[in-house]
Amino acid sequence: MVITSLDQLDPNGTYTYADYLLWQFSERVELLRGKVRQMAAPNRRHQVISRRLQYVIMTALLKSPCELYDAPFDVRLTRMRNDKEVKTVVQPDLCVICDLSKLDDRGCNGAPDLIIEILSPGNSRTEMKDKFELYQEAGVLEYWIVSPIEKTIQVWKLNEQGIYIGLQPKVEGDIVTTPIIPNLAVDVTEVFLD
């Protein structure tokens, strides 16, 4: 049966990436532990911040083996060959992948090295709790949460025990760097220019 509307799905059902690939509706969704989560359309401010971050990151990646992708781009957090076993598919606002063997025609199969999520009204809980836990479990080395309202970038780094350690939030006037992209320097003030 062809699924063309979210209404055709059981809101309490558990789905896999194999199911997700068959859906033919215009809404953007993610699978978090097999549960469908509809994504809100990003507002203009969100898009401006995303574009500014993309520009700085792309410039820093010019001579790097890593690649940058922006949503919509499917990331299957658990590296598996069988689509029926994959229960989590996310579409981060931005992600950097340095192990290019994780890339295929459908997106990324495994944890990116860096994920950046830009908060939007209504998605804060998902980004701050649900995705935080998923990204930590999957082994995403760094997770940045960008808050347009607070004008901050919160950087979480995975330690040797596989637990995220939060750095002091970066605010206007600060520079964000990462060993994942050695020559990257994100000026927080420029990210949030009005």
Image (spheres, rainbow, N blue to C red):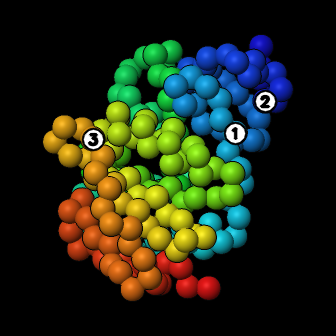
Query: Is 131 situated above or below 15?
Result: below
**Residue shown at 60%/36% (left/top)?**
30
**Residue shown at 33%/79% (left/top)?**
175
- For the view shown, which residue lies furthest in the front direction? 168
Quadrant of the snapshot with the N terminus: top right
What is the crowding at mark 3: few (fewer than 14 residues within 10 Å), some, or many (at least 20)? some
Query: Is 57 situated above or below 106?
Result: below
Q: Nearer the viewer, mark 3 or mark 1?
A: 3
**Callout 1: SS:** strand
x and y percentages locating residue 28 in the rendered image: 68, 42
| 20 lies left or right of 94 | right
x and y percentages locating residue 118 in the rendered image: 54, 60
Please give the residue where the numbered disc 3 appears in the rendered image: 163
What is the crowding at mark 2: few (fewer than 14 residues within 10 Å), some, or many (at least 20)? some
Q: Nearer the viewer, residue 136 or 70?
A: 136
x and y percentages locating residue 160 in the rendered image: 16, 42
The answer to which quarter of the image holds residue 170 is bottom left
Q: Nearer the viewer, residue 69 or 158?
A: 158
The kind of residue tagged 1 is Gln
**Residue shown at 20%/62% (left/top)?**
179
Q: Nearer the viewer, mark 2 or mark 3?
A: 3
Pointers 1 and 2 in contact (CB under 8 A)?
yes
Please give the residue where the numbered disc 2 appears in the rendered image: 6
The kind of residue tagged 3 is Ile
Query: Is 31 situated above or below 43?
Result: above
- Of the residues under marks 2 and 3, which one precedes in the sequence? 2
Q: Which mark is residue 38?
A: 1
Cα–Cα span, label 2 and label 3: 35 Å
**Callout 2: SS:** helix
Query: Is 16 situated above or below 28?
Result: above
- Residue 121 at least partly seen: yes
**Callout 3: SS:** loop
